[in-house]
Image (spheres, grey):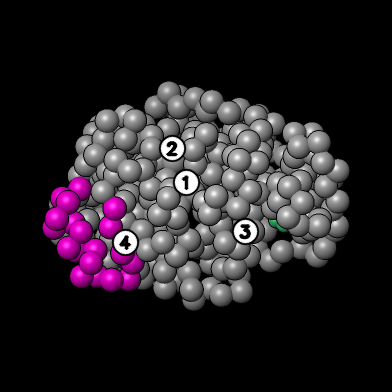
């Protein structure tokens, strides 16, 4: 298929582009390079440097490339930042996405795959979290994804745009050629790796007074290439389905302390840590039940344990201590 990938120069987008190309699809990357990296774009993909706020550029890209499917990764994605600056998330993730949705409808695109999030579930009633859990977003970031999911629901009903909403738990890990390089970095595993590489003195643990076994937040880490394979399976499955909703996680939770300990094990570095107050918007525990996509689409994550995920990240960061600058 011909697939337009917004955010295809970013962390999860660039790995998904590689997977699409390896599976024989034709790819157009649309990215403003604010957070993405030109070097992360697969050379076999067409590249459009553009912003979703630019309605004319979005339309021109659809007119020129005529995509049959859209994978929409481009968005802000930080829970803590969205609690400080909620309108940034309404403006980018919702208002700018409107230009993309308009073009999708105008140009008769058949399939839309949305990067959604486990932050749809602030205080889940049942852990691990299944697709039947009620949606109560934990932050303006989660809310922005909930809004797009709902609009996709209505666009499917009214305009026939088929869609898949993929709710990621915590994306982590690297491939041999693609890694995680956010400026500034705010995610736990790459920050801990920066300590191990001597680029940062210590890691701050945001709160140890949560209702969890060791008091620190529990998360479900899922490898970026397993997320990419889920996108391709979901895109293919839209041939026979009008809409799909899947939670993408490994089904096991690791506390912040356990994640730090895993990086200690993999890197051999002592990694000093300090407890600081909670970060606003962080739910205590998020663990995903992904049995639905496993049974319906045969998705089988290749990196089922945190250690192998951290090892893949450690390998890439040792090779690229300055990220894509190296
Ligand atoms: N975290 C932390 N220190 C950091 C960064 C993150 O304690 O420097 C915690 C954060 O509070 C959350 C977990 O690590 O409980 C994972 O955070 P991350 O930002 O990696 O992903 P999120 O869960 O927000 O998607």
Q: Is disc 2's CB within 8 Å of ligand 1?
A: no
Please report whichever mark, 2 or 4, sits nearer to the chain's N-terminal start: 4
Gap in angstroms between the C-alphas marked 1 and 3: 15 Å
Determine whether, in the image, residue 292 is placed left or right of residue 195.
left
| Rendered residue at 38%/34% (across/down) | 19
Q: Is residue 169 visible?
A: no
The residue carrying mark 4 is 49
Determine whether, in the image, residue 11 is placed left or right of residue 114.
right
Please report whichever mark, 1 or 2, sits nearer to the chain's N-terminal start: 1
Q: Secondary structure at mark 3?
A: loop
Question: Dot 1: within a 10 Å radius of its alpha carbon, few (fewer than 14), some, or many (20 or more) residues?
Answer: many
Q: Is residue 250 above or below residue 161?
A: above
Q: Reply yes or no: does residue 237 show up in magenta.
A: no
Q: Are marks 1 and 2 in contact (CB under 8 Å)?
A: yes
Image depth: mark 2 or mark 3 in front? 3
Q: Reply yes or no: does residue 53 show up in magenta.
A: yes
Question: Dot 4: within a 10 Å radius of its alpha carbon, few (fewer than 14), some, or many (20 or more) residues?
Answer: few
Please report whichever mark, 4 or 3, sits nearer to the chain's N-terminal start: 4
Where are the magenta residues, as a range? 47-67
Q: Is residue 122 above or below residue 235?
A: below
Please report whichever mark, 1 or 4, sits nearer to the chain's N-terminal start: 1
Q: Secondary structure at mark 2?
A: helix
Q: Are marks 2 and 3 in contact (CB under 8 Å)?
A: no
The residue carrying mark 3 is 185
Q: In which quadrant of this rendering is ligand 1 seen?
A: bottom right
Q: Quadrant where the N terminus lies?
A: top left
The residue carrying mark 2 is 228
| Rendered residue at 52%/34% (across/down) | 176
The residue carrying mark 1 is 12
Q: Secondary structure at mark 1?
A: helix
Gap in angstroms between the C-alphas marked 4 and 3: 23 Å
């Amino acid at each position: 298929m011909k697939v337009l990938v917004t955010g295809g120069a970013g962390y999860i987008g660039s790995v998904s582009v590689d997977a699409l190309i390896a599976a024989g699809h034709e790819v157009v990357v649309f990215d403003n390079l604010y957070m993405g990296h030109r070097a992360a774009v697969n050379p076999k993909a067409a590249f459009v440097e553009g912003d979703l706020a630019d309605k004319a550029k979005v339309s021109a890209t659809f007119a020129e490339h005529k995509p049959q499917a859209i994978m929409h990764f481009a968005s802000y994605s930080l829970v803590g930042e969205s609690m400080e600056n909620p309108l940034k998330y309404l403006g980018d993730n919702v208002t700018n996405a409107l230009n993309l949705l308009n073009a999708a409808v105008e140009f008769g695109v058949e399939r839309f795959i949305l990067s959604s999030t486990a932050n749809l579930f602030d205080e889940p009633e049942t852990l691990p979290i299944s697709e039947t859990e009620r949606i109560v977003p934990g932050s303006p970031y989660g809310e922005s994804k909930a809004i797009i999911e709902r609009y996709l629901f209505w666009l499917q009903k009214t305009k026939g745009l088929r869609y898949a909403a993929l709710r990621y738990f915590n994306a982590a890990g690297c491939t041999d050629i693609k890694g995680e390089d956010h400026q500034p970095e705010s995610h736990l595993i790459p920050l801990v790796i920066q300590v191990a590489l001597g680029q940062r003195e210590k890691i701050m643990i945001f709160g140890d007074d949560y209702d969890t076994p060791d008091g620190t937040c529990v998360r479900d880490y899922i490898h970026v290439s397993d997320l990419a394979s889920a996108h391709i399976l979901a895109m293919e499955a839209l041939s026979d389905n009008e809409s799909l909703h899947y939670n993408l996680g490994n089904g096991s939770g690791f506390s912040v302390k356990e994640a730090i300990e895993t990086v200690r094990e993999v890197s051999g570095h002592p990694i000093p840590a300090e407890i600081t107050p909670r970060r606003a918007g962080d739910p205590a525990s998020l663990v995903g039940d992904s049995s639905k996509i496993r049974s319906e689409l045969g998705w089988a994550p290749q990196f089922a344990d945190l250690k192998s995920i951290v090892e893949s990240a450690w390998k890439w960061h040792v090779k690229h201590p300055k990220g894509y600058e190296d």
